[in-house]
Amino acid sequence: NDPSLQTVFSLVNRDGEEVRVVGGAVRNSLLGAKVSDIDCATTAEPHTIMAWAQEAGIKAIPTGIDHGTVTLVIDGRPFELTTLRTDVETDGRHAEVAFGRDWGEDAHRRDFTMNAVYMDAEGRLYDPVGQGIKDARARHVRFIGDADRRIAEDYLRILRFFRFFSQYGERLEEGDYQACIAAQASLPTLSAERIGAEMVKLLEGPFALKALDAMHQGGMLTGLLACVPHLARFARLKQLAAQLYLKPDLNLLMTALCIDVREDAERLAKTLRLPNRNRDAMMRMAKTVRSIKTINEQVLEQLAYAHGKETARDLVLLALVRRQIAPDLTELSMLLRDIALWTVPVFPLNGRDLIDKGMKPGPKIGNHLGQLEKAWVSSGFALSKGQLLSMARSLR
Ligand code: ATP
Ligand code: MG
């Protein structure tokens, strides 16, 4: 009963073609969890879907037309439609694909049993592999077919195995786990972007610690992250965030993993090909957190002024994780709530004001402004413009 999805069904279910939902959306609806992106499988070929969408005035993007993927955008939401395929030849990095019409074959070329359950327009479920519904409900991550062979077809599946474990967290198929560990040396053949995308989902998963722990025990985490991860710190962050009802974002999660060696933040961000803004944020946090020795309203306001309110909150969490501060959590939670409502003040002085007071234009002005701003921040943002200007007179 999702009207945008109904549009997909009515667009494609005709002329002998059929579309069914598959993957995460089916998995999550089986578990009663939130459904975000919807992936669909269809017998219709990409150019047919493109033509039908155009006729119907629906936006269609040929996101991966050679691989059989078209993205329909309906009410601003993306629906990824992939034509049923049969695998031809693979080298472990690139899959050759040919279109097919066989749902069973399409199911068997998917990675895990829980990912090969389909739902049609009437809400009927199809489980061609035969274990998908049961495994999804049991949150049991298990390869379809022989794990060694499936991994050799696409090494990304190693990471996906742990990523789904991080999201569902109940059970790893032991033999499959061993196969992943045994094949880890092939991970570097994957593009960093593909690795990064799976690792991000893994770190954000509710059972991330369990998944990271399993990887670490298999000796695969250090190489993957380009640093020795500090799982205890990561665990503590997850726990603190839960106690404070906060949802840590990716920068915070990753910084917690590598906080003890400052350069690791940069290495980790680079390895996972995170956008520069994530990398810079991580490096800044890793560097700044060490200066936090105590926490109170004034310290928090100063951090918020210097780094922004959200980063200030994250820095406090990291300082807690590193046990640099040990505040009462109830008090801290109130402080954090107050800072979220706080309006960051604006420094009341600029270069023009100093020139108007007779100071010669030049580089000294910036220097003086910097000193005055520092004094203003230390005063708890209390010094007025007039007071700052009279202080300016004593600066040379
Ligand atoms: P999410 O909810 O995070 O999107 P998902 O299961 O939908 O999880 P996607 O990466 O969106 O994962 O892929 C959609 C589906 O395509 C998967 O459920 C799986 O059936 C199939 N798939 C994706 N990547 C692979 C792969 N590397 N090997 C085999 N099948 C894959
Ligand atoms: Mg998906």
Image: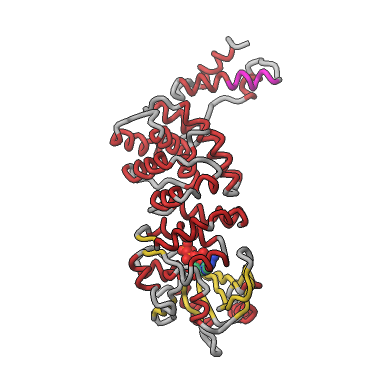
Residue 76 in view, yes or no: no
Does residue 110 belong to the magenta stretch?
A: no
Of the pair 5 and 130, the residue shown nearer to us: 130
Residue shown at 35% from the left, 39% from the top: 337
Location of residue 161 with respect to 317 vertically, above or below: below
Please tell me which residue is depicted at 28% across the width and 36% down the height of the picture: 330
Residue at the spot 30% in from the left edge and 35% down from the top edge: 329
Q: Quadrant of the N terminus?
A: bottom left
Q: What span is colored magenta in the figure? A: 363-370
Q: Position of residue 353 (x, y in %)?
A: 61, 22
**Percent x, y for residue 346?**
52, 31
Q: Quadrant of residue 268?
A: top right
Percent x, y of residue 224: 54, 48
Vertical arrangement, residue 106 with respect to residue 263, above or below: below
How many marks overall? Answer: 0
Task: Kindly report the secondary structure that dominates the magenta region of the rendered protein.
Answer: helix
The quadrant of the rendering that contains the C terminus is top right
